[in-house]
Image: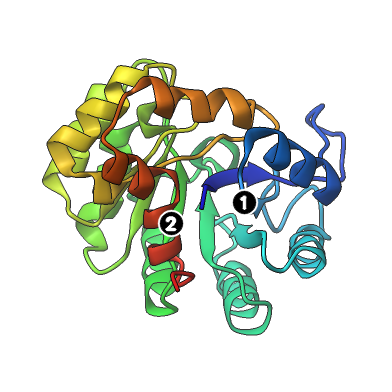
């Protein structure tokens, strides 16, 4: 079972990207991906007020293949808490997505910490955009990991292009941190991550449609992991974390 931990569905063109649920499924099929975590490209509350409904409708249309993450802006804390509770308890969403660059909310800020803890209390992980931009670097997100030891934090892109080693160091320091591989261009760093923190804390993601799911999966193949390790990274870990394992 191949599980992509990072895909997007969006109906607006404000960012120049658009992907329907059908487009998402088509890209998954081309890459041999059975299941995906899906989220909007924009934050709530924000540019697309239908974001929550959009993801819920996609997941309802493909109930065994798509699993929702709700992308929220901690600056609107009370609204975000309400939306997170609705998403998880009423709509069956599996996680929270935070993008510090678009929200301008520091990962170590009080509102962000509150929302991550709230997600943990609901039993779902927090997926961060973790790259090279200010506010999104691994050391910035490390402040959240330190403040929320009982919440699972996933570093999407595992540090981007220039902060991968920093992401590895953060994951070694904090056992509640998981590394996710999307749009990180170094297959050998996937192997390094498995060697340093264990295959159980590394997950495959593509960041589709920004990146190609088929290309992103090839990075894991090129990393030349052992069969058991590859099974965990490519899907086993995600299914276990999201409560989907048989």
Q: Position of residue 216 (x, y in %)?
A: 53, 27
Residue 181 disc label: none
Residue occupying image coordinates x 53% and y 40%: 104
Q: Residue 129 in the image: x percent, y percent?
A: 48, 39
Mark with earlier residue (2, 1) = 1
Q: Which image quadrant is residue 121 in?
A: bottom left
In the rendered image, which quarter contains the C terminus?
Answer: bottom left
Quadrant housing residue 191:
top left
226 with respect to 35 (left or right): left
Q: Nearer the viewer, residue 71 or 154?
A: 154
Q: Nearer the viewer, mark 2 or mark 1?
A: 1
Farthest residue toward the front?
227
* Front position in the image: 192 or 111: 192
Residues at marks 2 and 1, CA–CA distance in whole angstroms = 12 Å
Instruction: From the top left corner, tell me how far across and down residue 110 is, in percent.
Output: 37, 59
Residue drawn at 71 percent across, 34 percent down: 30
- The image quadrant of residue 193 is top left
- Neighbourhood count class around disc 2 (C-alpha, 10 Å): few under 14, some 14–19, many 20 upward: many
Left or right? Give the position of 6 relative to 108: right
**Residue at numbered disc 2:** 238
In this rendering, position of residue 153 left or right of residue 53: left
Q: Is residue 33 visible?
A: yes
User: Do tag 2 and tag 1 residues touch (Cβ < 8 Å)?
Assistant: no
Q: Which residue is mark 1?
A: 34
Going 30% across and 52% down the picture, which residue do you hit? 144
Q: Label 1: state its secondary structure.
A: loop
Q: Is residue 245 above or below residue 192?
A: below
């Amino acid at each position: 079972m191949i599980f992509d931990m990072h895909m997007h569905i969006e109906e607006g063109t404000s960012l120049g990207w658009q992907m329907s649920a059908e487009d998402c499924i088509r890209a998954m099929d081309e890459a041999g991906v059975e299941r995906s975590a899906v989220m909007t490209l924009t934050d709530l509350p924000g540019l697309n007020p239908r974001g929550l409904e959009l993801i819920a409708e996609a997941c309802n249309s493909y109930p065994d293949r798509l699993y929702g993450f709700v992308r929220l802006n901690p600056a609107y804390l009370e609204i975000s808490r309400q939306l997170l509770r609705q998403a998880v308890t009423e709509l069956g969403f599996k996680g929270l997505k935070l993008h510090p660059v678009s929200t301008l909310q520091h990962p170590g800020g009080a509102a962000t910490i509150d929302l991550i803890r709230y997600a943990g209390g609901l039993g779902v992980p927090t997926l961060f955009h973790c790259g090279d931009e200010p506010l999104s670097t691994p050391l910035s997100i490390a402040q959240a990991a330190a403040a929320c030891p009982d919440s699972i934090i996933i570093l999407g892109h595992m540090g981007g292009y220039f902060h991968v080693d920093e992401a590895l160091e953060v994951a070694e320091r904090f056992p509640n941190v998981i590394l996710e591989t999307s749009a990180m261009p170094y297959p050998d760093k996937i192997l390094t991550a498995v060697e340093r923190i264990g295959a159980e804390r590394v997950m495959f993601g593509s960041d589709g449609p920004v990146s190609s799911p088929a290309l992103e999966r090839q990075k894991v193949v090129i990393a030349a992991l052992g069969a058991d390790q590859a099974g965990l990274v490519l899907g086993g870990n995600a299914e276990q974390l999201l409560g989907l394992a048989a």
